[in-house]
Image (cartoon, helix red, strand yellow):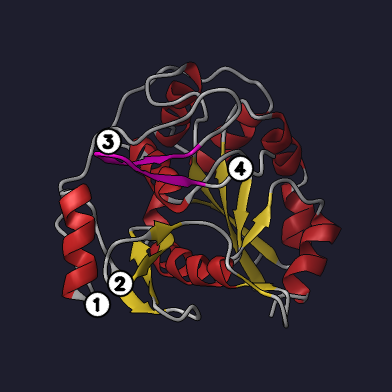
Amino acid sequence: MNNMRVLIVFTLLFTVQACAQSAAPTPLKNTTAKSVAAKDDPVIRAALVKVAPNIQITNIGPSPIVGFKEVSLDGSVVYVSNDGKYLFQGALIDLATRKNLTDISQAAIRKNTLAAVPDSRKIIFAPANPKYTVTVFTDIDCGFCRKMHSQIAEYNKLGIAVDYLFFPRAGVGSESFQKAVNVWCAPNRNIALTMAKNDKSLPKKTCANNVAADYNLGVKIGVDGTPAVYAANGQQLGGYLSPQDLLKVLQNLN
């Protein structure tokens, strides 16, 4: 799985890109949401809005760096100086603990974002009493996605529930996108997904679906390849992991 992260680029516009393979997927359309800050700093907010009027600020809070605030931008984290003149993005590492503080903050954002997705929007493969639940962004045509799904019974046997959301890497309107729609519109989505993962053709269908919404959600939280596996705490566990390896990772989460 590609390990590139979402890059936030400030030019005259604020752009978010999530890269998967050679093409960079982009949201279907620009959001026009206004800045909403749980904690506010008028100086920093004014500076960011001046550069990117449609930017969505979800929180402005303290950071470990003297003279800088940590700013949550609808799924991503950046650091802005108290006077609003300087911004940087990247991994902030605590050298004493060797922890990536930026990842910790981003995981908290992803946790809340993914928790807000209702079960009715997912395709769920779960044991009777799951010990763990992971959210997996999947692409019908992704080789490692197919390998993971071929072992779905083993994940479930180990107590791991898999909540699938779609992320057709080729983008909206692609063949992979249509295959996801075909699955969603099928009478039994679980059976249809398994058939599609086994390269079985499904009837082309159109219905109200969440494929575009899933795709945009993936872009928002920084999915840059598939499968993208997230724990319930929002931590990205990586791409494909064997059932035993995924269980070990889940057991060792902080």
In the image, the segment drawn in magenta is 6-18
- Taking the spot 67% from the left edge, 37% from the top edge, the residue there is 145
Magenta stretch holds residue 15: yes
| Amino acid found under the numbered disc labelled 2 | Asn
**Side of 224 where 198 appears, left or right:** right
Between marks 1 and 4, how big is the CA–CA gap? 29 Å
Q: Name the residue that disc number 4 marks.
A: 4
Marks 2 and 1 close (CB-CB < 8 Å)? yes
Q: How many marks?
A: 4
Residue 159 in picture, x, y percent from top left: 72, 68
Indicate the secondary structure of the residue bearing disc 1: loop
Q: Nearer the viewer, residue 51 or 141?
A: 51
Between marks 4 and 2, how big is the CA–CA gap? 24 Å
**Side of 50 where 137 appears, left or right:** right
- Indicate which disc residue 109 carries: none
Kindly report which numbered mark, 3 or 2, lies closer to the viewer in this rendering.
2
| Amino acid found under the numbered disc labelled 1 | Ala
Between marks 3 and 4, how big is the CA–CA gap? 32 Å
Residue 252's place in the image compared with 11, above or below, is below
Marks 4 and 2 close (CB-CB < 8 Å)? no
Q: Earlier in the sequence, mark 3 or mark 2?
A: 2
| Amino acid found under the numbered disc labelled 3 | Ala
Q: Name the residue that disc number 1 marks.
A: 38
- Taking the spot 38% from the left edge, 33% from the top edge, the residue there is 26
Magenta residues: mostly which secondary structure?
Answer: strand
- Taking the spot 49% from the left edge, 71% from the top edge, the residue there is 105
Residue 138's place in the image compared with 253, above or below, is above
